[in-house]
Image: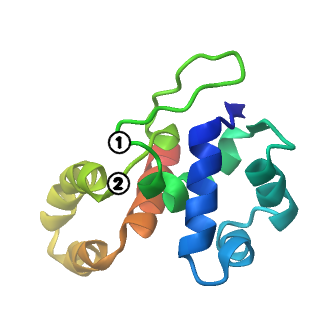
Amino acid sequence: MIKIDKYIREALLDCFSAIEGGQLRVAEETGIQQASLSRWNSGKVESMTNDNWRKIVAYIGEYLPEDYIPKDIRGRQIKNLSQINLGTPAINPLVEPCIKILEKDPMLISIVEDLHKLDKVKKLKVLLYMEELE
């Protein structure tokens, strides 16, 4: 469980304000209930599941402090790939080794081209999926 601290609350608020459609759109795109997003944002709920963190971090990551590492409900830092703030500068180097492997096979070049076109949210989703497959 991830502790929802002041940084996460502020990032949620900033994200909802910046995205057209706010909370509702984020709820639709992440699959997280809007009521949960509202309770996190208001402070009524002080933690979220790791699964929900994976879903929301792609949206709020750019609003979190640089090098932000979330803590679990016991106050321990959580540092694995699926639970850290990954902005575009952090995501691109992680995707590059995958791209180098794919480029070796001419039949997979279209996948490489598609990976380059993805925004940071979608790149993060691909990385999380690949992490789950390992």
Helix, strand or loop at mark 1: loop
- Please determine whether, in this image, residue 74 is positioned above or below residue 2: above
Image-based side of 33 in relation to 29, left or right: right
Question: Residue placed at 69% from the left, 49% from the top?
Answer: 52
Helix, strand or loop at mark 2: loop
- Quadrant of the image for the C terminus? top left
Question: Residue placed at 41% from the left, 42% from the top?
Answer: 65
Q: Residue 63 location, x and y as percent?
A: 47, 55
Image-based side of 81 in relation to 109, left or right: right
Name the residue that disc number 1 marks: 66
Which of these two is toward me, 117 or 39?
Answer: 39
N-terminal label among 2 and 1: 1
Kindly indicate whether the residue at mark 1 contacts the one at mark 2 (C-beta within 8 angstroms): yes
The residue mark sitting in front, 2 or 1, is: 1
> Which label was assigned to residue 12?
none
Question: Residue placed at 53% from the left, 73% from the top?
Answer: 18
Residues packed near mark 1 inside 10 Å, few (<14), some (14 to 19) or many (20 plus): few
Q: Residue 117 location, x and y as percent?
A: 28, 79
Which of these two is toward me, 66 or 77?
Answer: 66
Name the residue that disc number 2 marks: 87
Q: Amino acid at mark 1?
A: Glu
Q: Residue 26 location, x and y as percent?
A: 66, 71
- Quadrant of the image for the N terminus? top right
- Please determine whether, in this image, residue 70 is positioned above or below residue 131: above
How far apart are labels 2 and 1 at the CA level? 9 Å
- Residue 12 image-quadrant placement: bottom right
Q: Amino acid at mark 2?
A: Gly
Question: Residue placed at 34% from the left, 75% from the top?
Answer: 118
